Image (cartoon, rainbow, N blue to C red):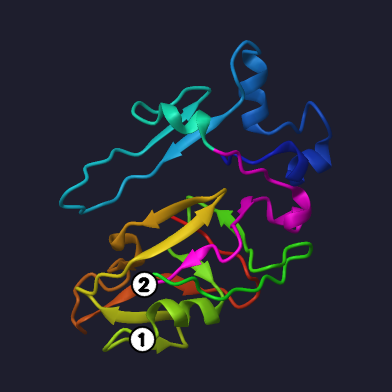
Amino acid sequence: MGLGFDTTSVVRGKLGKGAGDTPLSRIFQLNKTTQNFVSLQLNRANDPTDTITGQITVSELVSGYENVTSQTKLWLKDAFMDSSNQHWAVVTDKNGVIGPDGSAISTDSIVRHISGGKMVAVLDSGFTFSQVPRKVSDAIYGRVQGATYSTQEGLWKVPCKQNLNLSFVFGGVTMPIHPLDVVGNDLNPSGSSGLCDGGVSVMCSTCSIVPC
């Protein structure tokens, strides 16, 4: 169904206001006394310690995360991305990608108006891997012993039991990525090669990143 905005909707561009309003806008129009927001919580399969159930809410907060309303707001601006992409997107802080060694990874965005070591982060709940430029993926996985890069698949293969730390910084808040999201075995479930797929793959056509 999609949870995009009216301003970047191709359908709305064809049908116009009203008939072409997005599903999210129509939901908000049904009850104008509630706040207009959605929340999305992803679950993680086969996690031995965290049993989180995936949830999506409209105008309601997920229990236990009520303090999200007091966090710094990250604004989406259409100028950050090609409007035809129809993605939610925010911008990292300067030097906002922290690698496994605890140091910031040098980054440069090709997105217009984005400079100074910041990057556009596309939020996509329907894609398996986080996508980054090759330079960034090399900095994350390139020094892992036994790791190899697959040009055919556009991602790194690392030892399955390798535990890597990775963080992104938004609005002054450092967001650590769970190690199970940095290395995954989704595409190699048998582990026959002894290698798993890096949770961050390469996107050569853009400098966008997708934090989990």
Residue at 19% in and 76% down: 191
The crowding category of the residue bearing disc 2, from other C-alpha atoms within 10 Å (few below 14, some 14 to 19, many at least 20), is some
Q: Is residue 99 above or below residue 6?
A: below
In depth, the one of 204 and 70 nearer the eye is 70
For the N terminus, which image quadrant?
A: top right
Say left or right for 82 vs 35: right
**Residue 157 inside the magenta-drawn segment:** no
Residue under numbered circle 2: 100
State which quadrant residue 62 falls in: top left
Q: Residues at badges 2 and 1 in contact (C-beta under 8 Å)?
A: yes
Q: Is residue 75 above or below residue 36?
A: below
Q: Position of residue 120 (x, y in %)?
A: 63, 60
For the C terminus, which image quadrant?
A: bottom left
**Residue 97 inside the magenta-drawn segment:** yes
Say left or right for 131 vs 74: left
Q: Secondary structure at mark 2?
A: loop
In depth, the one of 102 and 14 nearer the eye is 102
State which quadrant residue 9 falls in: top right
Say left or right for 72 vs 57: right
Q: Is residue 91 above or below residue 41?
A: below
Of the residues shown, which amino acid type is indicated by label 2? Answer: Pro
Q: Position of residue 4 (x, y in %)?
A: 64, 41
Q: Is residue 127 above or below residue 143?
A: above
User: Residues in magenta?
Assistant: 72-100
Residue under numbered circle 1: 143
Q: Position of residue 14 (x, y in %)?
A: 82, 42
